Image (cartoon, rainbow, N blue to C red):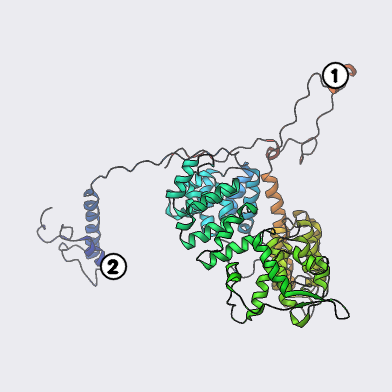
Amino acid sequence: MNGTPAGGDITAPDTSWEELVTNALLGTDRRPPAHAAPGRPAPVALLDAAAVATVRRRAGLRPARAARRPERAPADPRPALPAPAARRLTTLLADRSAGGSGGRRGSTPDLMELLPQWLAAANAHGYAAPAQTLPALLDAARGRTDLRPAALAFAGPRALWLARLNPDWRFALRAAPGGGAALPGADDAEAVRRLWREGLFAERAALLGALRARTPALGRELLASTWTTERAEDRLMFLDSLRTGLSEADEPFLEQALGDRSRNVRATAAELLSTLPGSALAARMAVRATACVALDRTGDAPAIVVEAPHECDAVMERDGVVATPPAGRGERSWWLGQLVEAAPLGTWQRRLGGRTAEEIVALPVTDGWQGELHAAWCRAAVRQRDAAWSRALLGSPSAPDAGGPGAVSLSERAKLLAALEPAERAAWVAGFIATHGLSEAFQLLGVCAVPWAPALGQAVVDALNIARDAGSYPWSFSGVMGLAERCLDPAEAVRLEALLAVPDEREDAAPGAGGYWAEAFQRLVTTLRLRAAMARELAPPTPPAPAAHPRDPAVTAAAHTGTRPPAPAPAPGRAVGHPPDPAVTAPAESSAQPPDAAG
Protein backbone atom coordinates (compact mmCIF):
# COMPACT_ATOMS: atom_id res chain seq x y z
CA MET A 1 0.00 0.00 0.00
CA ASN A 2 2.95 2.28 -0.59
CA GLY A 3 1.68 3.52 -3.94
CA THR A 4 -1.51 4.24 -5.78
CA PRO A 5 -2.96 1.12 -7.47
CA ALA A 6 -3.48 1.06 -11.20
CA GLY A 7 -6.67 2.69 -12.31
CA GLY A 8 -6.72 5.04 -9.28
CA ASP A 9 -7.89 4.16 -5.80
CA ILE A 10 -9.45 6.49 -3.32
CA THR A 11 -8.19 4.31 -0.48
CA ALA A 12 -4.59 5.13 -1.35
CA PRO A 13 -2.50 6.61 1.49
CA ASP A 14 -2.22 9.96 -0.23
CA THR A 15 -5.98 10.46 0.21
CA SER A 16 -6.17 12.30 3.56
CA TRP A 17 -8.87 11.83 6.13
CA GLU A 18 -9.71 15.54 5.89
CA GLU A 19 -10.31 15.15 2.16
CA LEU A 20 -12.70 12.25 2.76
CA VAL A 21 -14.63 14.29 5.32
CA THR A 22 -14.84 17.24 2.93
CA ASN A 23 -16.20 15.00 0.15
CA ALA A 24 -18.81 13.56 2.50
CA LEU A 25 -19.96 16.98 3.71
CA LEU A 26 -20.23 18.51 0.25
CA GLY A 27 -21.66 15.38 -1.39
CA THR A 28 -20.15 13.31 -4.16
CA ASP A 29 -22.34 15.05 -6.76
CA ARG A 30 -20.73 18.39 -6.00
CA ARG A 31 -17.27 17.03 -5.29
CA PRO A 32 -16.61 13.55 -6.72
CA PRO A 33 -13.73 11.55 -5.22
CA ALA A 34 -10.43 12.32 -6.92
CA HIS A 35 -9.21 8.71 -7.17
CA ALA A 36 -12.40 6.66 -7.53
CA ALA A 37 -12.02 3.27 -9.28
CA PRO A 38 -13.65 3.08 -12.76
CA GLY A 39 -17.18 1.72 -12.72
CA ARG A 40 -17.50 2.17 -8.97
CA PRO A 41 -20.33 4.51 -7.86
CA ALA A 42 -18.87 7.57 -6.19
CA PRO A 43 -20.87 7.28 -2.91
CA VAL A 44 -19.93 3.62 -2.50
CA ALA A 45 -16.30 4.34 -3.31
CA LEU A 46 -16.26 7.11 -0.70
CA LEU A 47 -17.66 4.81 2.00
CA ASP A 48 -15.14 2.10 1.08
CA ALA A 49 -12.35 4.62 1.36
CA ALA A 50 -13.58 5.83 4.75
CA ALA A 51 -13.70 2.24 6.05
CA VAL A 52 -10.16 1.50 4.89
CA ALA A 53 -8.87 4.82 6.28
CA THR A 54 -10.50 4.11 9.64
CA VAL A 55 -8.75 0.75 9.93
CA ARG A 56 -5.48 2.35 8.88
CA ARG A 57 -5.82 5.12 11.51
CA ARG A 58 -6.59 2.68 14.30
CA ALA A 59 -3.82 0.29 13.33
CA GLY A 60 -1.35 3.14 13.34
CA LEU A 61 -1.95 4.07 17.00
CA ARG A 62 0.89 3.27 19.33
CA PRO A 63 -0.03 1.74 22.69
CA ALA A 64 0.39 4.16 25.58
CA ARG A 65 1.33 3.48 29.17
CA ALA A 66 -1.73 2.63 31.22
CA ALA A 67 -2.86 5.36 33.59
CA ARG A 68 -2.60 4.77 37.31
CA ARG A 69 -5.77 3.34 38.79
CA PRO A 70 -7.55 5.68 41.21
CA GLU A 71 -7.50 4.92 44.89
CA ARG A 72 -10.44 3.02 46.30
CA ALA A 73 -13.50 5.03 47.21
CA PRO A 74 -13.53 5.79 50.93
CA ALA A 75 -15.98 3.97 53.14
CA ASP A 76 -19.01 5.83 54.49
CA PRO A 77 -19.60 4.73 58.09
CA ARG A 78 -23.10 6.19 58.35
CA PRO A 79 -26.14 3.88 58.40
CA ALA A 80 -27.67 2.90 55.09
CA LEU A 81 -30.72 4.72 53.81
CA PRO A 82 -33.95 2.68 54.15
CA ALA A 83 -34.95 1.11 50.85
CA PRO A 84 -38.26 3.06 50.47
CA ALA A 85 -36.41 6.33 51.08
CA ALA A 86 -33.76 5.36 48.53
CA ARG A 87 -36.44 4.80 45.91
CA ARG A 88 -37.98 8.15 46.78
CA LEU A 89 -34.63 9.89 46.35
CA THR A 90 -34.23 8.36 42.90
CA THR A 91 -37.66 9.72 41.94
CA LEU A 92 -36.89 13.20 43.26
CA LEU A 93 -33.58 13.35 41.40
CA ALA A 94 -35.13 12.10 38.16
CA ASP A 95 -37.62 14.99 38.28
CA ARG A 96 -34.97 17.71 38.51
CA SER A 97 -35.42 18.73 34.88
CA ALA A 98 -39.17 19.23 35.29
CA GLY A 99 -39.01 22.37 37.40
CA GLY A 100 -39.05 25.88 36.07
CA SER A 101 -41.04 25.08 32.96
CA GLY A 102 -43.30 28.10 33.50
CA GLY A 103 -46.96 28.34 32.65
CA ARG A 104 -49.80 26.67 34.48
CA ARG A 105 -48.53 24.04 36.90
CA GLY A 106 -51.68 21.96 37.20
CA SER A 107 -52.18 19.68 40.21
CA THR A 108 -48.87 17.78 39.98
CA PRO A 109 -46.41 18.40 42.85
CA ASP A 110 -43.04 19.92 42.03
CA LEU A 111 -40.74 17.12 43.21
CA MET A 112 -37.54 19.08 42.77
CA GLU A 113 -38.75 21.67 45.27
CA LEU A 114 -39.16 18.87 47.82
CA LEU A 115 -35.57 17.71 47.41
CA PRO A 116 -34.05 20.31 49.82
CA GLN A 117 -36.52 19.25 52.51
CA TRP A 118 -35.82 15.58 51.88
CA LEU A 119 -32.05 16.17 52.13
CA ALA A 120 -32.43 18.10 55.39
CA ALA A 121 -34.43 15.25 56.92
CA ALA A 122 -31.99 12.59 55.68
CA ASN A 123 -29.06 14.55 57.11
CA ALA A 124 -30.89 14.93 60.44
CA HIS A 125 -31.17 11.13 60.61
CA GLY A 126 -27.49 10.73 59.69
CA TYR A 127 -28.01 8.44 56.69
CA ALA A 128 -25.42 7.68 54.01
CA ALA A 129 -26.30 8.29 50.36
CA PRO A 130 -26.74 5.17 48.19
CA ALA A 131 -23.75 4.85 45.88
CA GLN A 132 -25.78 4.68 42.66
CA THR A 133 -27.48 8.03 43.40
CA LEU A 134 -24.26 10.03 43.79
CA PRO A 135 -23.88 11.07 40.11
CA ALA A 136 -27.45 12.38 39.90
CA LEU A 137 -27.08 14.03 43.30
CA LEU A 138 -23.91 15.84 42.18
CA ASP A 139 -25.57 16.89 38.92
CA ALA A 140 -28.50 18.34 40.86
CA ALA A 141 -26.15 20.24 43.18
CA ARG A 142 -24.18 21.50 40.20
CA GLY A 143 -27.32 23.06 38.71
CA ARG A 144 -28.64 24.55 41.97
CA THR A 145 -26.22 26.24 44.33
CA ASP A 146 -28.85 26.33 47.10
CA LEU A 147 -28.76 22.52 47.19
CA ARG A 148 -25.01 22.21 47.55
CA PRO A 149 -24.48 22.34 51.33
CA ALA A 150 -27.17 19.75 52.11
CA ALA A 151 -26.43 17.61 49.04
CA LEU A 152 -22.70 17.42 49.73
CA ALA A 153 -23.27 16.70 53.42
CA PHE A 154 -25.57 13.82 52.46
CA ALA A 155 -23.29 12.53 49.68
CA GLY A 156 -20.38 12.31 52.11
CA PRO A 157 -16.74 11.46 51.32
CA ARG A 158 -17.56 9.50 48.17
CA ALA A 159 -18.82 12.68 46.48
CA LEU A 160 -15.37 14.23 46.88
CA TRP A 161 -13.79 11.04 45.52
CA LEU A 162 -16.00 11.28 42.43
CA ALA A 163 -15.41 15.03 42.10
CA ARG A 164 -11.67 14.40 41.65
CA LEU A 165 -12.46 12.17 38.65
CA ASN A 166 -15.00 14.39 36.85
CA PRO A 167 -14.30 18.06 36.06
CA ASP A 168 -18.05 18.80 36.01
CA TRP A 169 -18.18 18.09 39.75
CA ARG A 170 -15.14 20.08 40.84
CA PHE A 171 -17.45 22.54 42.61
CA ALA A 172 -17.73 19.93 45.37
CA LEU A 173 -14.00 20.27 46.08
CA ARG A 174 -14.30 24.06 46.25
CA ALA A 175 -17.30 23.86 48.55
CA ALA A 176 -15.70 21.34 50.89
CA PRO A 177 -13.46 22.68 53.69
CA GLY A 178 -9.88 22.64 52.50
CA GLY A 179 -10.87 21.49 49.01
CA GLY A 180 -11.94 18.11 50.33
CA ALA A 181 -8.70 17.46 52.19
CA ALA A 182 -8.71 16.67 55.89
CA LEU A 183 -7.89 19.71 58.00
CA PRO A 184 -5.37 19.33 60.83
CA GLY A 185 -6.69 19.39 64.36
CA ALA A 186 -6.07 22.26 66.73
CA ASP A 187 -3.73 20.04 68.78
CA ASP A 188 -1.38 19.57 65.81
CA ALA A 189 0.22 23.00 66.03
CA GLU A 190 2.95 22.36 63.44
CA ALA A 191 0.49 21.11 60.80
CA VAL A 192 -1.80 24.08 61.48
CA ARG A 193 1.04 26.59 61.05
CA ARG A 194 2.30 24.86 57.90
CA LEU A 195 -1.13 24.84 56.24
CA TRP A 196 -1.67 28.48 57.23
CA ARG A 197 1.68 29.51 55.71
CA GLU A 198 1.66 27.33 52.59
CA GLY A 199 -1.98 26.47 51.83
CA LEU A 200 -4.20 27.88 49.13
CA PHE A 201 -6.64 30.62 50.09
CA ALA A 202 -9.61 28.20 50.24
CA GLU A 203 -7.65 25.87 52.50
CA ARG A 204 -6.58 28.71 54.79
CA ALA A 205 -10.12 30.11 54.97
CA ALA A 206 -11.48 26.66 55.82
CA LEU A 207 -8.81 26.19 58.47
CA LEU A 208 -9.56 29.56 60.06
CA GLY A 209 -13.29 28.86 60.06
CA ALA A 210 -12.80 25.44 61.67
CA LEU A 211 -10.53 26.88 64.35
CA ARG A 212 -12.96 29.71 65.14
CA ALA A 213 -15.77 27.18 65.57
CA ARG A 214 -13.77 25.10 68.10
CA THR A 215 -11.04 27.31 69.59
CA PRO A 216 -11.75 30.97 68.70
CA ALA A 217 -8.61 32.27 70.42
CA LEU A 218 -6.32 30.03 68.38
CA GLY A 219 -7.96 31.14 65.13
CA ARG A 220 -7.55 34.81 66.05
CA GLU A 221 -3.89 34.33 67.02
CA LEU A 222 -3.21 32.53 63.73
CA LEU A 223 -4.73 35.41 61.75
CA ALA A 224 -2.82 38.01 63.76
CA SER A 225 0.48 36.26 63.04
CA THR A 226 0.27 37.07 59.29
CA TRP A 227 -2.17 39.99 59.29
CA THR A 228 0.25 42.65 58.03
CA THR A 229 1.39 40.51 55.07
CA GLU A 230 -2.09 39.54 53.78
CA ARG A 231 -3.68 41.15 50.74
CA ALA A 232 -6.54 43.58 51.41
CA GLU A 233 -9.20 41.33 49.88
CA ASP A 234 -7.91 38.38 51.91
CA ARG A 235 -7.86 40.43 55.10
CA LEU A 236 -11.51 41.31 54.53
CA MET A 237 -12.53 37.66 54.05
CA PHE A 238 -10.49 36.45 57.01
CA LEU A 239 -11.86 39.21 59.23
CA ASP A 240 -15.41 38.22 58.37
CA SER A 241 -14.71 34.73 59.75
CA LEU A 242 -14.33 36.25 63.23
CA ARG A 243 -18.13 36.50 63.42
CA THR A 244 -18.00 32.87 64.51
CA GLY A 245 -17.21 32.79 68.21
CA LEU A 246 -17.01 36.59 68.44
CA SER A 247 -16.36 37.75 72.03
CA GLU A 248 -14.76 40.52 74.06
CA ALA A 249 -11.43 38.71 73.71
CA ASP A 250 -11.39 39.72 70.01
CA GLU A 251 -11.71 43.45 70.79
CA PRO A 252 -7.96 44.33 70.85
CA PHE A 253 -7.40 42.74 67.45
CA LEU A 254 -10.47 44.42 65.96
CA GLU A 255 -9.42 47.78 67.40
CA GLN A 256 -6.11 47.34 65.59
CA ALA A 257 -8.01 46.56 62.37
CA LEU A 258 -9.78 49.93 62.64
CA GLY A 259 -6.53 51.50 61.43
CA ASP A 260 -6.30 49.28 58.36
CA ARG A 261 -5.48 50.79 54.97
CA SER A 262 -8.61 49.27 53.41
CA ARG A 263 -11.90 51.10 54.00
CA ASN A 264 -13.85 47.84 53.71
CA VAL A 265 -11.68 46.19 56.36
CA ARG A 266 -12.19 49.17 58.67
CA ALA A 267 -15.95 49.07 58.14
CA THR A 268 -16.14 45.33 58.88
CA ALA A 269 -14.05 45.69 62.02
CA ALA A 270 -16.30 48.53 63.21
CA GLU A 271 -19.43 46.47 62.54
CA LEU A 272 -18.06 43.55 64.56
CA LEU A 273 -17.08 45.82 67.44
CA SER A 274 -20.50 47.45 67.49
CA THR A 275 -22.09 44.05 68.14
CA LEU A 276 -20.10 43.87 71.38
CA PRO A 277 -22.02 46.23 73.72
CA GLY A 278 -19.08 46.53 76.11
CA SER A 279 -16.50 47.47 73.48
CA ALA A 280 -14.72 50.81 73.48
CA LEU A 281 -16.02 51.54 69.97
CA ALA A 282 -19.61 50.95 71.10
CA ALA A 283 -19.02 53.41 73.95
CA ARG A 284 -17.60 56.02 71.58
CA MET A 285 -20.56 55.61 69.24
CA ALA A 286 -22.96 55.91 72.17
CA VAL A 287 -21.41 59.24 73.16
CA ARG A 288 -21.72 60.58 69.62
CA ALA A 289 -25.29 59.29 69.14
CA THR A 290 -26.61 60.61 72.46
CA ALA A 291 -25.17 64.03 71.63
CA CYS A 292 -27.54 64.07 68.64
CA VAL A 293 -30.71 62.68 70.27
CA ALA A 294 -32.35 64.10 73.40
CA LEU A 295 -35.69 64.27 75.20
CA ASP A 296 -37.61 67.55 75.06
CA ARG A 297 -39.92 68.08 78.05
CA THR A 298 -40.83 71.70 77.33
CA GLY A 299 -43.99 70.95 75.37
CA ASP A 300 -47.34 69.51 76.43
CA ALA A 301 -45.93 65.99 76.07
CA PRO A 302 -42.36 64.72 75.96
CA ALA A 303 -40.86 64.32 72.49
CA ILE A 304 -37.54 63.33 70.97
CA VAL A 305 -35.49 66.07 69.35
CA VAL A 306 -32.68 65.35 66.89
CA GLU A 307 -29.65 67.46 65.99
CA ALA A 308 -27.72 65.55 63.32
CA PRO A 309 -23.90 65.88 63.27
CA HIS A 310 -22.51 68.77 61.24
CA GLU A 311 -19.30 67.04 60.17
CA CYS A 312 -17.64 63.64 59.89
CA ASP A 313 -14.12 63.96 61.25
CA ALA A 314 -11.18 61.59 60.84
CA VAL A 315 -11.83 59.88 64.20
CA MET A 316 -15.40 59.05 63.16
CA GLU A 317 -14.13 57.64 59.88
CA ARG A 318 -11.64 55.46 61.75
CA ASP A 319 -14.56 54.08 63.77
CA GLY A 320 -16.29 52.98 60.59
CA VAL A 321 -18.48 55.97 59.69
CA VAL A 322 -18.57 56.35 55.91
CA ALA A 323 -18.25 60.05 55.10
CA THR A 324 -19.71 60.12 51.58
CA PRO A 325 -23.44 59.32 51.41
CA PRO A 326 -25.07 57.43 48.55
CA ALA A 327 -26.83 59.38 45.84
CA GLY A 328 -30.00 61.03 47.06
CA ARG A 329 -29.08 61.00 50.76
CA GLY A 330 -28.16 64.06 52.78
CA GLU A 331 -24.83 64.02 54.58
CA ARG A 332 -26.15 64.80 58.05
CA SER A 333 -28.93 62.19 58.01
CA TRP A 334 -26.45 59.65 56.61
CA TRP A 335 -24.00 60.26 59.46
CA LEU A 336 -26.75 60.23 62.08
CA GLY A 337 -28.05 56.86 60.90
CA GLN A 338 -24.60 55.27 61.18
CA LEU A 339 -24.02 56.62 64.69
CA VAL A 340 -27.40 55.43 66.02
CA GLU A 341 -27.04 52.07 64.31
CA ALA A 342 -23.68 51.39 65.99
CA ALA A 343 -24.66 52.58 69.49
CA PRO A 344 -25.74 49.91 72.02
CA LEU A 345 -29.52 49.92 72.35
CA GLY A 346 -29.23 49.96 76.12
CA THR A 347 -27.93 53.51 75.76
CA TRP A 348 -31.38 54.89 74.97
CA GLN A 349 -33.08 53.72 78.12
CA ARG A 350 -30.60 55.76 80.16
CA ARG A 351 -30.67 58.70 77.77
CA LEU A 352 -34.47 58.96 77.46
CA GLY A 353 -35.62 58.91 81.06
CA GLY A 354 -35.51 55.19 81.86
CA ARG A 355 -38.26 54.34 79.40
CA THR A 356 -38.66 50.86 77.89
CA ALA A 357 -38.12 50.17 74.21
CA GLU A 358 -41.90 50.25 73.56
CA GLU A 359 -42.24 53.60 75.31
CA ILE A 360 -39.27 55.09 73.45
CA VAL A 361 -40.59 53.98 70.03
CA ALA A 362 -44.00 55.47 70.90
CA LEU A 363 -42.54 58.93 71.57
CA PRO A 364 -43.06 61.54 68.83
CA VAL A 365 -39.94 62.74 67.01
CA THR A 366 -39.78 66.39 65.99
CA ASP A 367 -38.82 68.01 62.69
CA GLY A 368 -39.45 64.95 60.52
CA TRP A 369 -36.60 62.83 61.89
CA GLN A 370 -38.79 59.90 62.97
CA GLY A 371 -38.27 57.80 59.85
CA GLU A 372 -34.49 58.17 59.92
CA LEU A 373 -34.23 57.52 63.65
CA HIS A 374 -36.52 54.49 63.66
CA ALA A 375 -34.80 53.01 60.62
CA ALA A 376 -31.44 53.27 62.41
CA TRP A 377 -32.93 51.61 65.50
CA CYS A 378 -34.22 48.81 63.24
CA ARG A 379 -30.73 48.17 61.90
CA ALA A 380 -29.30 48.26 65.42
CA ALA A 381 -31.89 45.76 66.68
CA VAL A 382 -31.07 43.39 63.82
CA ARG A 383 -27.31 43.75 64.28
CA GLN A 384 -27.48 43.27 68.06
CA ARG A 385 -30.28 40.67 67.84
CA ASP A 386 -32.24 42.49 70.52
CA ALA A 387 -35.67 40.86 70.91
CA ALA A 388 -37.16 43.65 73.07
CA TRP A 389 -36.34 46.38 70.56
CA SER A 390 -37.38 44.18 67.62
CA ARG A 391 -40.72 43.59 69.29
CA ALA A 392 -41.19 47.31 69.95
CA LEU A 393 -40.30 48.33 66.40
CA LEU A 394 -42.56 45.68 64.88
CA GLY A 395 -45.50 46.85 66.95
CA SER A 396 -48.81 45.05 67.03
CA PRO A 397 -49.50 42.86 63.98
CA SER A 398 -53.11 44.04 64.01
CA ALA A 399 -52.23 47.75 63.89
CA PRO A 400 -53.89 49.60 60.99
CA ASP A 401 -50.49 50.64 59.64
CA ALA A 402 -48.96 47.46 58.23
CA GLY A 403 -45.50 48.95 58.64
CA GLY A 404 -45.67 49.17 62.41
CA PRO A 405 -44.31 52.07 64.44
CA GLY A 406 -40.70 51.69 63.34
CA ALA A 407 -40.21 49.29 60.44
CA VAL A 408 -39.89 51.05 57.12
CA SER A 409 -40.18 48.16 54.68
CA LEU A 410 -41.17 44.52 54.38
CA SER A 411 -37.53 43.48 54.38
CA GLU A 412 -36.92 45.41 57.63
CA ARG A 413 -39.88 43.69 59.26
CA ALA A 414 -38.60 40.29 58.14
CA LYS A 415 -35.17 41.04 59.64
CA LEU A 416 -36.71 42.19 62.93
CA LEU A 417 -38.80 39.01 63.12
CA ALA A 418 -35.65 36.91 62.85
CA ALA A 419 -34.57 38.19 66.30
CA LEU A 420 -37.68 36.69 67.95
CA GLU A 421 -38.17 33.12 69.09
CA PRO A 422 -39.82 30.86 66.45
CA ALA A 423 -43.12 30.56 68.33
CA GLU A 424 -43.45 34.31 68.82
CA ARG A 425 -42.42 34.92 65.22
CA ALA A 426 -45.13 32.57 63.92
CA ALA A 427 -47.79 34.10 66.18
CA TRP A 428 -46.91 37.63 65.01
CA VAL A 429 -47.07 36.70 61.32
CA ALA A 430 -50.37 34.86 61.87
CA GLY A 431 -51.83 37.99 63.43
CA PHE A 432 -50.49 40.11 60.59
CA ILE A 433 -52.10 37.84 57.96
CA ALA A 434 -55.41 37.82 59.83
CA THR A 435 -55.49 41.63 59.66
CA HIS A 436 -53.76 42.50 56.40
CA GLY A 437 -54.12 39.34 54.29
CA LEU A 438 -51.40 37.71 52.22
CA SER A 439 -50.54 40.50 49.81
CA GLU A 440 -47.66 41.77 51.99
CA ALA A 441 -46.87 38.60 53.94
CA PHE A 442 -44.61 36.70 51.53
CA GLN A 443 -41.30 37.95 52.94
CA LEU A 444 -42.56 37.58 56.49
CA LEU A 445 -43.52 33.96 55.90
CA GLY A 446 -40.02 33.26 54.59
CA VAL A 447 -38.44 33.79 58.04
CA CYS A 448 -40.85 31.50 59.92
CA ALA A 449 -39.70 28.08 61.12
CA VAL A 450 -40.72 25.03 59.08
CA PRO A 451 -43.16 23.37 59.43
CA TRP A 452 -45.33 26.35 60.20
CA ALA A 453 -46.94 26.42 63.63
CA PRO A 454 -50.63 25.39 63.63
CA ALA A 455 -51.89 28.94 64.17
CA LEU A 456 -49.79 30.27 61.30
CA GLY A 457 -50.79 27.45 58.97
CA GLN A 458 -54.45 28.03 59.76
CA ALA A 459 -54.08 31.75 59.11
CA VAL A 460 -52.50 31.10 55.70
CA VAL A 461 -55.16 28.56 54.67
CA ASP A 462 -57.98 30.84 55.84
CA ALA A 463 -56.51 33.78 53.90
CA LEU A 464 -56.18 31.68 50.75
CA ASN A 465 -59.78 30.52 51.13
CA ILE A 466 -60.96 34.11 51.57
CA ALA A 467 -59.04 35.18 48.47
CA ARG A 468 -60.61 32.36 46.47
CA ASP A 469 -64.15 33.20 47.63
CA ALA A 470 -63.56 36.88 46.83
CA GLY A 471 -62.76 36.03 43.21
CA SER A 472 -59.20 37.34 43.48
CA TYR A 473 -56.68 36.70 40.74
CA PRO A 474 -55.20 33.31 41.75
CA TRP A 475 -51.88 34.00 40.04
CA SER A 476 -51.19 36.75 42.59
CA PHE A 477 -50.92 34.08 45.30
CA SER A 478 -48.74 31.57 43.45
CA GLY A 479 -45.71 32.50 45.59
CA VAL A 480 -47.59 31.93 48.85
CA MET A 481 -48.97 28.67 47.47
CA GLY A 482 -45.44 27.51 46.70
CA LEU A 483 -44.35 28.38 50.24
CA ALA A 484 -47.35 26.57 51.69
CA GLU A 485 -46.47 23.41 49.77
CA ARG A 486 -43.04 23.37 51.42
CA CYS A 487 -43.85 24.81 54.85
CA LEU A 488 -47.37 23.80 55.91
CA ASP A 489 -47.62 21.00 58.44
CA PRO A 490 -48.68 17.86 56.49
CA ALA A 491 -51.46 17.37 59.04
CA GLU A 492 -53.23 20.34 57.40
CA ALA A 493 -54.05 18.14 54.38
CA VAL A 494 -57.19 16.84 56.10
CA ARG A 495 -58.56 20.36 56.62
CA LEU A 496 -57.78 21.32 53.01
CA GLU A 497 -59.84 18.54 51.43
CA ALA A 498 -62.95 20.70 51.65
CA LEU A 499 -61.32 23.21 49.26
CA LEU A 500 -60.69 20.81 46.38
CA ALA A 501 -64.00 21.35 44.58
CA VAL A 502 -64.21 23.91 41.78
CA PRO A 503 -66.09 26.90 43.26
CA ASP A 504 -68.87 28.76 41.49
CA GLU A 505 -67.24 31.70 39.75
CA ARG A 506 -68.47 35.17 40.58
CA GLU A 507 -69.29 37.57 37.82
CA ASP A 508 -66.42 39.85 38.76
CA ALA A 509 -63.91 36.97 39.16
CA ALA A 510 -60.99 36.41 36.82
CA PRO A 511 -61.91 34.04 33.97
CA GLY A 512 -60.91 30.48 34.84
CA ALA A 513 -59.96 31.43 38.38
CA GLY A 514 -62.13 28.72 39.95
CA GLY A 515 -60.38 25.95 38.03
CA TYR A 516 -56.98 27.38 38.89
CA TRP A 517 -57.82 27.55 42.59
CA ALA A 518 -59.06 23.95 42.56
CA GLU A 519 -55.85 22.80 40.85
CA ALA A 520 -53.70 24.78 43.30
CA PHE A 521 -55.43 23.31 46.35
CA GLN A 522 -55.25 19.82 44.84
CA ARG A 523 -51.52 20.27 44.29
CA LEU A 524 -51.14 21.55 47.84
CA VAL A 525 -52.96 18.55 49.35
CA THR A 526 -51.03 16.09 47.19
CA THR A 527 -47.71 17.70 48.14
CA LEU A 528 -48.53 17.61 51.86
CA ARG A 529 -49.41 13.92 51.64
CA LEU A 530 -46.20 13.30 49.76
CA ARG A 531 -44.20 15.08 52.45
CA ALA A 532 -45.88 12.95 55.11
CA ALA A 533 -44.94 9.81 53.16
CA MET A 534 -41.35 11.03 52.86
CA ALA A 535 -41.15 11.50 56.63
CA ARG A 536 -42.43 7.97 57.23
CA GLU A 537 -39.94 6.50 54.77
CA LEU A 538 -37.01 8.28 56.42
CA ALA A 539 -38.00 7.30 59.96
CA PRO A 540 -35.69 4.60 61.39
CA PRO A 541 -37.34 1.16 61.43
CA THR A 542 -39.06 0.21 64.66
CA PRO A 543 -37.06 -2.50 66.50
CA PRO A 544 -39.01 -5.70 67.24
CA ALA A 545 -40.47 -6.05 70.73
CA PRO A 546 -38.30 -8.22 73.00
CA ALA A 547 -39.57 -11.72 73.74
CA ALA A 548 -41.08 -12.26 77.18
CA HIS A 549 -38.57 -13.64 79.69
CA PRO A 550 -39.59 -16.84 81.51
CA ARG A 551 -39.36 -14.93 84.79
CA ASP A 552 -41.61 -12.17 83.45
CA PRO A 553 -44.50 -11.75 85.94
CA ALA A 554 -47.05 -12.02 83.13
CA VAL A 555 -45.58 -15.35 81.99
CA THR A 556 -45.36 -16.66 85.55
CA ALA A 557 -48.95 -15.74 86.26
CA ALA A 558 -50.08 -17.40 83.04
CA ALA A 559 -48.27 -20.62 83.99
CA HIS A 560 -50.17 -20.78 87.30
CA THR A 561 -53.57 -19.91 85.83
CA GLY A 562 -53.32 -21.86 82.60
CA THR A 563 -53.95 -18.75 80.47
CA ARG A 564 -51.87 -17.23 77.71
CA PRO A 565 -49.66 -14.22 78.48
CA PRO A 566 -50.88 -10.98 76.92
CA ALA A 567 -49.65 -10.40 73.37
CA PRO A 568 -47.45 -7.37 72.74
CA ALA A 569 -49.18 -4.31 71.34
CA PRO A 570 -49.10 -4.09 67.53
CA ALA A 571 -46.44 -1.89 65.97
CA PRO A 572 -47.56 1.52 64.71
CA GLY A 573 -49.33 1.31 61.37
CA ARG A 574 -50.25 -2.42 61.77
CA ALA A 575 -53.74 -3.73 62.23
CA VAL A 576 -54.30 -6.55 64.70
CA GLY A 577 -54.56 -9.90 62.93
CA HIS A 578 -52.71 -8.74 59.82
CA PRO A 579 -49.20 -9.78 58.78
CA PRO A 580 -46.47 -7.29 59.61
CA ASP A 581 -45.69 -4.57 57.07
CA PRO A 582 -42.14 -5.21 55.78
CA ALA A 583 -41.57 -1.44 55.47
CA VAL A 584 -42.22 -1.08 59.22
CA THR A 585 -40.65 -4.23 60.69
CA ALA A 586 -37.84 -5.17 58.30
CA PRO A 587 -34.38 -3.85 59.14
CA ALA A 588 -33.03 -1.13 56.88
CA GLU A 589 -30.95 -2.43 54.03
CA SER A 590 -28.66 -0.63 51.66
CA SER A 591 -29.89 -0.16 48.14
CA ALA A 592 -26.34 -0.15 46.80
CA GLN A 593 -22.96 -1.64 47.52
CA PRO A 594 -20.07 0.78 48.07
CA PRO A 595 -17.82 1.19 45.04
CA ASP A 596 -14.60 -0.74 45.63
CA ALA A 597 -12.55 0.97 42.96
CA ALA A 598 -12.83 3.06 39.86
CA GLY A 599 -14.58 1.42 36.95
Gap between marks 1 and 2, in whole Å?
A: 92 Å
Residue 19 screen position, x and y as percent:
22, 64
Marks 1, 2: nearer the viewer:
1
Precedes in sequence: disc 1 or disc 2? 2
Q: Is 456 in front, or is 196? A: 196
Q: What residue is at 51 percent from the left and 66 percent from the top? A: 262
For label 1, count other residues whose C-alpha is less than 10 Å away and answer few (under 14), some (14-19) or many (20+): some
Residue identified by numbered label 2: 25
Residue extending furthest toward the right:
561
Q: What residue is at 66 percent from the left and 45 percent from the top? A: 538
Q: In which quarter of the image is the C terminus?
A: top left
Q: Is 71 in front, or is 135? A: 71
Q: What residue is at 47 percent from the left and 45 percent from the top? A: 193
Q: Which amino acid does label 2 sit on?
A: Leu
Q: What residue is at 53 percent from the left and 57 percent from the top? A: 238
Residue identified by numbered label 1: 556
Mark 1 and mark 2 in contact? Answer it, CB < 8 Å: no
Report whether residue 408 is seen.
no
Residue 64 screen position, x and y as percent:
26, 45
**Element type where label 1 sits in the image:** helix
